[in-house]
Amino acid sequence: MSIDTHKDFLIWQRLTEVIEERKRERSNRNSYVASLLNQGVEGINAKVIEEAGEVVEAAQEPGEQGVAHLVREVADLTFHCMVLLSARDSSWRAVEQELARRFGVGGLVEKAARAGSTAATDSDSTMPDPQPPN
Ligand SMILES: N=c1c2ncn([C@@H]3O[C@H](COP(=O)(O)OP(=O)(O)OP(=O)(O)O)[C@@H](O)[C@H]3O)c2ncn1[C@@H]1O[C@H](COP(=O)(O)O)[C@@H](O)[C@H]1O
């Protein structure tokens, strides 16, 4: 599968800009994003739960149509998560930064490092500095 990274990067940025614009003009009655933001975190949470349920249902559908449906539902879920982040004054950028911070650190390696650390506590989720991938 070929991915146009540049274009994909821009769509996250552009969508974030639109969401922030809607946030500034919440009275926009023709905006779905504004209507979501007006419902607050509780209302957006309900949509995220609904969309997550649709993702797992679509994941079980067979064939190419099932995969295409899954992609659409993941896009719906991601979009609603982006609006949720905005409602909490964060953005997809923060998610990208978190994923970048984790990049190259295997989940099992990170967990073992946590278990081996005498200073580690339940609330200590600090990960080691990312290593380049093998
Ligand atoms: N990316 C999206 C986007 N993805 C999904 N949705 C909406 O999210 C809603 C999904 O809710 P539902 O699942 O209940 O909808 P549904 O029709 O029942 O769908 P299924 O249950 O069949 O999956 C639909 O109304 C979609 O139109 C989106 N609405 C808006 N955007 C982006 O947000 C921008 C601003 O939108 P407005 O604020 O409406 O101008 C748009 O230009 C788009 O770029």
Image (cartoon, helix red, strand yellow):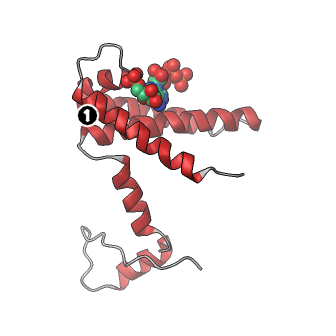
- Left/right of residue 3 with respect to residue 107 in the rendered view: right
Crowding at dot 1, Cα within 10 Å, few <14 / some 14-19 / many 20+, comes out as some
The residue wearing badge 1 is 41
Point 22% across, 29% down: residue: 24
Residue 82 figure quarter: top left
Residue 74 coordinates in the image, percent (x, y): 53, 39
Point 58% across, 53% down: residue: 5
- Left/right of residue 127 with respect to residue 76 in the rendered view: left
Residue 40 coordinates in the image, percent (x, y): 23, 29
Above or below — where is 3 with respect to 24? below
Point 35% across, 38% down: residue: 17
Above or below — where is 89 with respect to 97? above
Point 25% across, 34% down: residue: 41
Q: Is mark 1 within 8 Å of ligand 1?
A: no
Question: Closer to the camera, 28 or 39?
Answer: 28
**Which element is circle 1 on?**
helix
Question: What's the residue type where badge 1 is placed?
Answer: Val
Residue 94 coordinates in the image, percent (x, y): 34, 54
Question: Closer to the camera, 25 or 34?
Answer: 25
